[in-house]
Image (cartoon, rainbow, N blue to C red):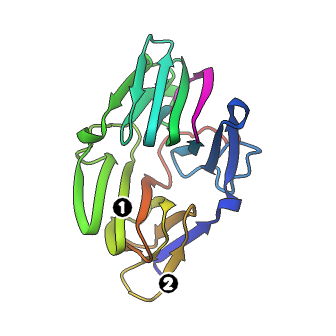
Amino acid sequence: MSMHVRRYLPSMQGRGAFDGGKITEQKPIGFSGEGSVINRIGPLFYWAWAHTPEEGHIPLHPHFGFEIMTYVIQGKAEHGDSLGTRSTVGSGGAQLIRAGSGVSHEERLIGPDMESFQIWFEPDLKVSNKREPSYEQWEHEQFPVTETAGGTVKQIVGGDAPLKLSVDAGMWDVQLEAGGTYSQLLHKGRALAALALRGGGRWSGELPGVHDETFDPRDFMLLSTDHDEEITVQALEGRLRMLLIEVPERVDYALLPKRY
């Protein structure tokens, strides 16, 4: 056996809420007590999928050390921080906070039907905690989009994407029509985390029909392989949209003990 797929249903993911329930979150990777079966994947420390029907506010709060990105699916996110930043990130845009020696920020999520991700990556905190904090932002049009068989792939982190992390990671927004496919080389020692936003599909490895794994909307998956292998995802019925993040399973620096 080569490809391994572990599937986590929505009930196995964490939950969170802000502003009296105006903002709700599904958390593939959450904090202590939030219900997430997965508590980290290498340097991928936290992953929250936020929704608000109309508008919700998360007040000023501090961060240290981590590289924290927000990726907006639809609607907009207003950002303010102790660096003096006031900004708005629209659909398809992203922001990155390098928290460094410390920064506080607040967020206002604005719909209708606003949807976004906040994802934390953990660099070597002994180094990053000594750096000056910073903020960067990019619009949808600044990210490279390529065609695949029956869909598109937008690179958000890694490759030619403008968003650069100090952490070794890749991130993609994959959209496929029914029957469309996307293939990616997965190396031994690396993990691919996948969250299905819309639609269901099927994963397969280099031996079609062997160890194929299907999934449904809102499922979270963790893929690994015993050797370098091309893995393929196919949309089954209707349009499929997935967010993919690839990271090393281990890093050469000490990671913060979970729980945080």
**Three-letter code for the amino acid on which mark 2 is drawn:** His
Q: Is the magenta stretch mostly helix, strand or loop?
A: strand
Which mark is drawn over residue 175?
A: 1
Question: Identity of the amino acid at label 1?
Answer: Gln
Q: Which span is picked out in magenta? A: 53-66
151 on left or right of 260: left
Residue 94 image position (x, y, % from top left): 38, 36
**Which residue occupies 43% across, 77% down?**
236
Kindly report the distance in space between the C-alpha atoms of the residues bearing marks 2 and 1: 23 Å
Q: Is residue 27 visible?
A: yes
Q: Residue furthest bottom?
A: 209
Residue 194 image position (x, y, % from top left): 48, 60
The number of numbered discs placed on residues in the rendered structure image is 2
Label 2 vs 1, first from the N-terminus: 1
Q: Mark 2 points at which residue?
A: 211
Q: Which residue is drawn at 35% across and 29% down?
A: 137
Where is residue 260 shown, x and y percent of the image?
68, 37
Instruction: Note whether 223 is above or below 97 in the view shown.
Output: below
Camera-side residue of 49 and 222? 49
